[in-house]
Amino acid sequence: MLLLPATVTVHEANDTLQMLTQALRRETGARLVVDASALAQFDSSVLAVLLECARQVKAAGKRLEVLHLPVKLRALAALYGVAELLPEAVA
């Protein structure tokens, strides 16, 4: 399981995506679980990061699941019409 940092804004987005991409390469299971419980400060950049991660995960024949997606991030994803692309894991 991977942990998102507390802050993912436009300033941290590239580093966060790089971390997730590297972790994906190391994962051997059929799914990649990302824990967003620490995420406290974010903007729409975190959606771009998670969607790119989801694209990479799918290309690798795996599935992405997100744990503890903040309510405000769920609302932002719904606003942009991408909520279904970020499946939530069952804790």
Image (cartoon, grey):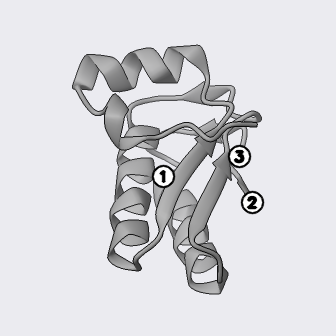
Along the viewing direction, whichever of 68 and 20 lies nearer the viewer? 68
Q: Are marks 1 and 3 in contact (CB under 8 Å)?
A: no
What whole-number distance in Å separates the C-alpha atoms at marks 1 and 3?
Answer: 10 Å
Is 70 placed above or below 90 here? above
Q: Which residue is mark 3?
A: 5
Q: CA distance from mark 2 to mark 3?
A: 13 Å
Look at the image and tell me in which quarter the N terminus lies.
bottom right
Q: Position of residue 80 (x, y in %)?
A: 24, 25
Of pointers 1 and 3, the one earlier in the residue sequence:
3
Foreground mark, 2 or 1, reads: 2
Name the one closer to the observer, 86 or 38.
86
Q: Secondary structure at mark 2?
A: loop
Residue 72, x across and y down, in percent: 52, 15
Looking at the rendered structure, the kind of residue marked 2 is: Met
Query: Which quadrant would residue 10 be assigned to in this image?
Result: top left
Q: Residue 26, position in %: x, y?
A: 65, 84
Q: Residue drawn at (68%, 31%), measured in percent from left and top?
A: 68
Residue named by callout 2: 1
Q: According to the image, label 1 marks what residue?
A: 13
How many numbered marks, from 0 up? Answer: 3
Secondary structure, mark 3, is: loop
Confirm or deny contact between disc 2 and disc 3 (CB under 8 A).
no
**Numbered badge on residue 83:** none
Q: Residues within 10 Å of mark 1 (few under 14, many from 20)?
A: many
Instruction: Using the rendered view, name the quadrant where residue 56 is placed.
Output: bottom left
Name the kind of residue labelled 3 in the image: Pro
| Residue 13, image x, y percentages | 48, 52
Residue drawn at x 36%, y 50% is 51
